């Protein structure tokens, strides 16, 4: 049995994370939240590199490489659940899994599976609101890994890339260098791509 899991909306009202509704999916709110969430837990030197910028640059790279706006749309939205639950870096998930294994003998993959299930529950509602099927194409997942390599190289240098525990993949065909944007620029860019790749123009309705 799942009880209510209440989480704030910007106006102080609450939504139930356990049962997200399409009415809970407010694109400007998602754009704002993602623009203030840091990739890599903000541990890189210099300004924060936001989740919103990651989503925009990866979506644009797919546009450059494939011209497939559906792939671009999925990439733009693939981390939208983080607006509701925050950014969970992979090392943090593994750290939690290790602790639960040591404390309660819970297999580590149970924790990883639970994290994916939480994200998927939100993703289903987000994709439905966007008019997309809930199955993410493989090319989106691969671009996520490719963006991770490119971001690591630019933010942490060759030493970071050497220590990155992911397989070697081609660098994405980016539009411009990876340089952290201010939150407002990242927010506006995310909403711009929402219009470009999904035909959802929140700014016109505002």
Image (spheres, helix red, strand yellow):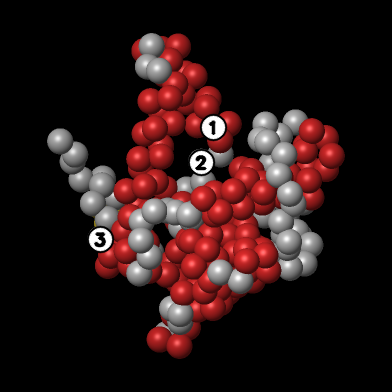
Query: For the N terminus, which image quadrant?
Result: top left
Query: For the C terminus, which image quadrant?
Result: bottom left
Quadrant in the picture for residue 25: bottom left
Q: Is residue 70 left or right of residue 51?
A: left
Of the image marks 3 and 1, the number of the one nearer the N terminus: 3
Of the image marks 2 and 3, the number of the one nearer the N terminus: 3
Name of the residue lying farthest toward the left? 1
| Secondary element type, mark 2 | loop
For label 3, the crowd category at 10 Å Cα-Cα, with few meaning under 14, some 14 to 19 and many 20 or more, is some
Which residue does the numbered mark 1 point to in the structure image?
92
Circle on res. 88:
2
Name of the residue lying farthest toward the right? 158
Is any atom of residue 32 visible in this view? no
Circle on res. 22:
none
For label 1, the crowd category at 10 Å Cα-Cα, with few meaning under 14, some 14 to 19 and many 20 or more, is few
Q: Does 160 sit above or below residue 136? A: above
Callout 2–callout 1 Cβ contact below 8 Å = yes
Which residue does the numbered mark 3 point to in the structure image?
21
Q: Residue at x 36, y 34 (%)?
A: 114
| Secondary element type, mark 1 | helix
Q: Residue at x 19, y 39 (%)?
A: 2
Q: Is residue 11 left or right of residue 198?
A: left
Q: Nearer the viewer, residue 1 or 184?
A: 1
Callout 3–callout 1 Cβ contact below 8 Å = no
The percent coordinates of residue 115 (x first, y second) are 41, 37
Disc 3 versus disc 1: distance between alpha carbons?
28 Å
The percent coordinates of residue 43 (x first, y second) are 69, 41
Disc 2 versus disc 1: distance between alpha carbons?
7 Å
């Amino acid at each position: 049995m799942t009880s209510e899991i209440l989480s704030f909306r910007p106006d102080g009202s609450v939504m139930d994370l356990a049962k997200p509704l399409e009415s809970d999916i407010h694109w400007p709110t998602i754009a704002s939240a993602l623009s203030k969430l840091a990739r890599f837990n903000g541990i890189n030197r210099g300004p924060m590199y936001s989740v919103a910028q990651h989503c925009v640059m990866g979506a644009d790279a797919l546009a450059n490489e494939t011209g497939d706006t559906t792939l671009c749309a999925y990439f733009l939205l693939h981390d939208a659940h983080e607006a509701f639950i925050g950014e969970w870096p992979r090392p943090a998930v593994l750290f939690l899994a290790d602790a639960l294994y040591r404390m309660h003998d819970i297999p580590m993959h149970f924790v990883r599976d639970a994290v994916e299930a939480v994200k998927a529950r939100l993703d289903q509602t987000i994709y439905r609101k966007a008019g997309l099927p809930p199955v993410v194409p493989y090319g989106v997942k691969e671009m996520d890994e490719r963006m991770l390599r490119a971001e690591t190289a630019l933010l942490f240098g060759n030493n970071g890339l050497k220590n990155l525990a992911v397989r070697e993949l081609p660098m994405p065909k980016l539009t411009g260098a990876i340089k952290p944007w201010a939150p407002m620029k990242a927010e506006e860019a995310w909403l711009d791509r929402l219009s470009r790749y999904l035909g959802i123009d929140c700014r016109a309705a505002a």
